[in-house]
Amino acid sequence: MKNWIKILLFIAFLAPTMLTYTQSEYCPEMQLLIQKYKNKDYNGAKNYLDTVLIKCPSRSQDPYFWHISGFIYFDVFKNIENRSPLSKSREMAVKSFLNSKKLDVKEKYIDRNRKAAKILASTYYNDAFRILNKKDTVMYEYTYKFYGKFKSITREIEPNSNFDQKDDDFNRGLGLIYKKKYENNKKRYRHFMDSAIVCFKRSIEINPEQYHSNYNLGIIYHNLGVDIILNDLEIDADLEKVIEMQESAIAYFSKALPYLTKVYQMKPSDREIVQGIAAVYYSLNDMEKHVEYMNVLRELENSPPSNNKK
């Protein structure tokens, strides 16, 4: 019997699997699992993982088992589930690779575990931005989840990772989608403007000098004030309601001013910014400042065109 087990172990060692057999305790179910995977029976291999753990419980502490498990789930995600953003196999693949990494004290599989986990992290990142680009509001709830997954996995494999630039890009991208959605249907998507404000403010927390986020916050607050006057204020509203709405509009105009002033300092020759500041001062009934910026606008209009863009 011992000789038969030695032969089996020798065959397993030479088999063209991803990695060589590493445990001295023989587990025939493990061999069948590997064979299923080699034959590209990915679902069969996935469904057999629990059987291996039941028949050979010591495998739960085997980094090689979890390494194989990671690749099985990875291939189910790729080849069976067609990289579905809602794939459960992707989650299990990540958990398996990270579990293998944790148990792999001798670091036999460290490079493969890290590379595979990094690839899976990138799929979460790509899915988050793919949802944004498709502008699918039903899936918006997953954007933060997927982006969070990307960051958490990356931290596991690269603890010193800096996400400032990606966080900035992500929040600006999502903010623009929310802003655009509101502009296309202001009554239906009013709550999206609040979400856009949150996103742009997060961007500014990361980079206070972020031009686009400051610009969009200034425009959003100004437009919200205008919308109150043009769309929300009813013609037959009583005086108390009119005063209340005017105060709300003025509050938005006041919030717009510091952001537009900041981007004006960054790009003083941008006519749209100057026009926006002039409009805000007009809305605030500060005619002196309104005239000042209208004069600046006239000077810019009479000067040669600049190449400044938002």
Image (cartoon, rainbow, N blue to C red):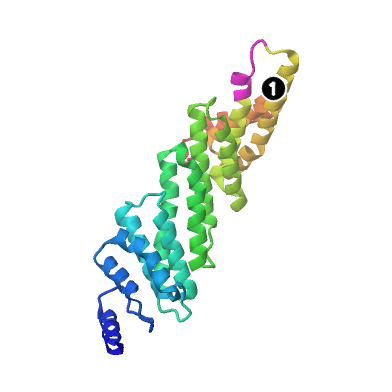
- Please identify the quadrant where the N terminus is shown: bottom left
Residue 295 showing in the rendered view: no
Who is closer to the viewer here, 82 or 261?
82
- Answer above or below: position of 126 versus 103: above
Residue 229: say if magenta: yes
Q: Residue at x 74, y 19 (%)?
A: 243
Name which quarter of the figure residue 245 lies in. Answer: top right
Q: Residue at x 66, y 25 (%)?
A: 283
**Dot 1, crowdedness within 10 Å: few (<14), some or many (≥20)?**
some
Name which quarter of the figure residue 196 lies in. Answer: top right
Q: Residue at x 47, y 51 (%)?
A: 146
- Answer above or below: position of 89 versus 107: above
| Residue receiving disc 1 | 245
In terms of secondary structure, what is the magenta stretch mainly? helix
The residue sitting at the bottom extreme is: 3
Name which quarter of the figure residue 124 lies in. Answer: bottom left
The kind of secondary structure element at disc 1 is: helix
Image spot of residue 275 (x, y percent): 57, 30
Region in magenta? 227-236
Question: Which amino acid type is marked by label 1?
Answer: Met
The residue sitting at the top extreme is: 236
